[in-house]
Image (spheres, rainbow, N blue to C red):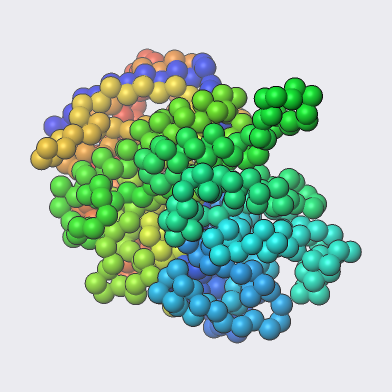
Amino acid sequence: FAQADTGKLDATTPGAVIRKEVYGQFVEHLGRGVYEGIWVGADSPIPNTRGIRNDVVAALRKIKVPVVRWPGGCFADDYHWRHGVGPQRQPSINSSWSNAIEPNTFGTHEFMDFVEQIGAAPYVGVNMGSGSVEEGQAWMQYMTAPANTAQGAERARNGRTEPWALPYVGVGNESWGCGGHMYPEEYANRYRQFQGYLKTYSGPKALKIATGPDTDDYAWTDTVMKLATRFRPNATSPILYAPTKPLMDGLSLHFYTLPSNRWGGVHPARGFGEAAWISTMKRALMMDELVTKHSAIMDTYDPKKEVALVVDEWGTWYDKEPDGPGGLWQQNTLRDALVAAVTLNIFHDHAERVRMANIAQMVNVLQAMILTDGPRMLVTPTYHVFDLYQVHQGARRLPLKLYAAPYRFGDIEVPGLSGTASVDAAGRVHVSLANVDANQPRRLTLAVQGVKPGAVRGQVITAPAMDSHNSFDAPATVAPREFSGARWTGSTLTVALPAKSVVTLELR
Ligand code: AHR
């Protein structure tokens, strides 16, 4: 039995561009995210280029990662960049993550080399929590000033004459929590001061991203938008100069998918039941409510949408794996693939405001793309969703309406299907669909306008169990396969979606 669902796709009215930066990623000095996951050192027997592992670079190049956020996370407000440049690197303490010894062998030069190798743009988070304006300003100059300045000359002495392009800078991280436990008023004032000095001195002007809310902290969004978006107005003097350009280009949002919708409790990454599956889906779908409500507040202060909502930490967060290496390492299963698809679909729906997002995190930490074990590497179900969804990067969103019967388990109910559609620069239409129903296949009948029925081809990600995953011994258990379940009948497209699956179709 396949549940019969219907929908409408209108390819005649393309909407906003889905920014490729929505497919950004996040790397933090945490667990094995950087050391082993990316950096093995030039002397390692693991094949590498200037210390950066070749297998990881090749896998990331394949999915066209547009932007990487670094060095944290909480670690960003703990990081003093001078420890990580020059020939004499002294270890320091990573007080954000178990007081681990930070060797500082992966610093600014190595990060910039890494993003260049994978073809991504850097998004660097400046330390506001334990750093100073002076330290942040000096780092910006070190990265972007010409070599005939003090900081630029220091960079050149350390091996890099040309400045780097730095298109994005973050100002603090979770300043309401690990980044300083500030009230929003305090953060807004500090932001105003910091942002004035965090300039680039060559290349593109860095877009400045302020610390935004945690989950549904709407008061944070309201206060920071109210106090930090604009030049301070002077109502009594109409002749004083007051630029109209916003003081920020982006406001971040952090939201993690916790299976029970709260911190604490028991959330294994594997070996869970259907109750955990559906509550994870429900929590992932909450992204839509959060983005909608934060965007509405932003609209009040920024009706022209000059400030992007940058979801620079999102993804699943499960329990420490009993037999895992720690450091927020978790296995990545078919459930994570569905969370990724549902979340990306929501970002597409809000393409006008959500112009960057960074999944947490890239390698070996939380909802990772890649897991490594010494010299071995595998790509996860989440990676495969990013691979299938590449076709939407930079494409224009198309209106897609789905009328899907709910999927229920216990006292939870969620829409059975989630989807998105776009048209790329070459006129190709792509439709991605996620059947979140753990048991029932779905038969979707889609009335399509504006596409001449022709060939339809696609790929599907599914697997026998909710927690099917890839292991180093069986790395292709969850992988995309050819999909032949779509048929045209006149201008109607019928798609037979397996239970718990993600499908991307190309309509030609
Ligand atoms: O991604 C792990 C941590 O989660 C980050 O360091 C922090 O910003 C968030 O709380």
Q: Residue at x 48, y 45 (%)?
A: 184
Quarter holding residue 503? top left
Side of 143 relative to 107 (left or right): right
Q: Nearer the viewer, residue 144 or 379?
A: 144
Q: Position of residue 200 (x, y in %)?
A: 75, 52
Q: Position of residue 98 (x, y in %)?
A: 40, 74
Looking at the picture, does residue 271 appear above or below residue 314?
below
Q: How many marks?
A: 0
Q: Residue furthest right?
A: 148
Side of 254 relative to 111 (left or right): left
Q: Residue furthest left?
A: 410
Q: Quadrant of the N terminus?
A: top left
**In the rendered image, is residue 258 in sight?**
yes
Q: Residue at x 34, y 30 (%)?
A: 486
**In the rendered image, is residue 167 in sight?**
no
Q: Residue at x 21, y 44 (%)?
A: 279
Looking at the picture, does residue 432 appear above or below residue 333?
above
Looking at the picture, does residue 451 appear above or below residue 313?
above
Q: Nearer the viewer, residue 142 or 401?
A: 142
Q: Residue at x 45, y 27 (%)?
A: 296
Q: Nearer the viewer, residue 32 or 377?
A: 32
Q: Position of residue 116 (x, y in %)?
A: 66, 59
